[in-house]
Amino acid sequence: MIKAVLFDTFGTIVDWRSSIAKESKELARSKGVNDFDGDAFARAWRAGYAPGMARVTAGKEAFVSIDFIHRQRLDEILPEFGLAMLDEDERTHLTLAWHRLDPWPDSLPGLTRIKSKFMISPLSNGSLMLLATMAKRAGIPWDFIFSSDMHRAFKRDPAVYQNAIRLLHLEPEQVMMAAAHNDDLAAARNEGIQTAYINRPTEYGIDQRVDFAATSDWTIIADSVEDLADQLGCPRMY
C-alpha cells in the first residue's frame, strides 16, 4: 500500500551534533580558542531551534527560513563560547555548517535500499537549499525534497503533513513518515499517515530527555534505516 516514505532529517538521517561540534571546534582552534567545547556548542545552538519555530507556529512572528533561525541563535551564543570576534563572513560560513551535516552510518545504505522500492524524500524543517546542499554533499539519494520553505510552516503544524499528501496525489495511508521523534510521528498519524520510528538515543548526547525508544504502536519500529529497509521488504544491495 505504501508508495512514498518521507523522512525527518535532523537527527534521523544526519548526525547534527557531531557534525556541528567538529566544524565549530576547528573554527575555534583557528581563532586561538583552544578550550572550546564543540559538543556543548552544538547542543546550545540546537537549543534555539524549537523556540524559534514555536514563535512562528504561534503566530508571533512571520514565517522565516530555518537558516534565519540558525543565524539568530548563533549570534546569541557566540560570546558565551569565546567567539564574539567572528566577522560577518565567518558567521555566515558557520551558519551554513547546517548544510554540511554528515549522515549516520546506516542512513545512505538504508535509503538506497528503500529508494529501490519506494519514492523517498525528506519532510523536514530544513530550508530547500539546506536540504539540497546537504544531499548533494553527502550523496543522500532523495527522489525529491519537501522543505519547510514549500509549506511556509514547520512541523508539527498539521499543514506540513497535509501539504505533502496533497503534493504527492496519494491517499494518506499510502504515505509513511519515518522519524526518530515520537511527537513528529504522532502529528503525522493524526493526518492518517503511516509511521516508522527509527531509534536515535544518542542524538542530543547528555541533553537527551525523550526519544530513547518508541512510545506508541507505530506502524514500524526500527533500530536504524537499514532495519527499516529490512522491515519494508527492500532488497539488500550487496
Image (tube, grey):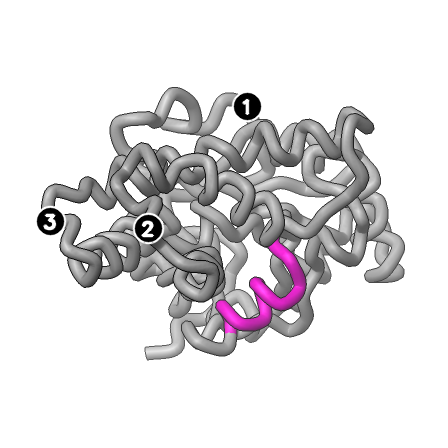
Q: Residue at x 30, y 61 (%)?
A: 105
Task: Name the one closer to the observer, 65 or 176.
Answer: 65
Q: Circle 3 sits in a helix, a strand or a loop, which is it? A: loop
Name the element at disc 1: loop
Q: Which residue is mark 2?
A: 85
Q: Is residue 205 above or below residue 71?
A: above
Residue annotated with mark 1 = 216
Q: Can you give x and y, in whole percent of width and height, for residue 167 in the image? A: 85, 60
Quote the CA–CA distance across marks 3 and 1: 44 Å
Horizontal side of 205 relative to 211 (left or right) equals left
Mark-to-mark CA distance, 3 and 2: 15 Å
**Amino acid type of disc 3?**
Asn
Percent position of residue 17, x then y: 33, 46
Secondary structure mostly seen in the magenta stretch? helix
Q: Badge 1 local density, few (<14 within 10 Å), some, or many (20+)?
A: few
Q: Are marks 3 and 2 in contact (CB under 8 Å)?
A: no
Residue 230 shows in the view? no
Residue drawn where x is 27% and y is 49% of the image: 21
Q: Which residues are magenta?
A: 126-135
Residue placed at 34% from the left, 42% from the top? Answer: 42
Q: Is residue 211 above or below residue 87?
A: above
The tag earlier along the polypeptide, 3 or 2, is 3
**Left or right: 56, with 196 as reference point:** right
CB-based contact (under 8 Å), mark 3 and mark 1:
no
Instruction: Name the residue at 57% across, 32% down.
Output: 50
Report which quarter residue 212 is drawn in. Answer: top left
Badge 3 is on which residue?
34
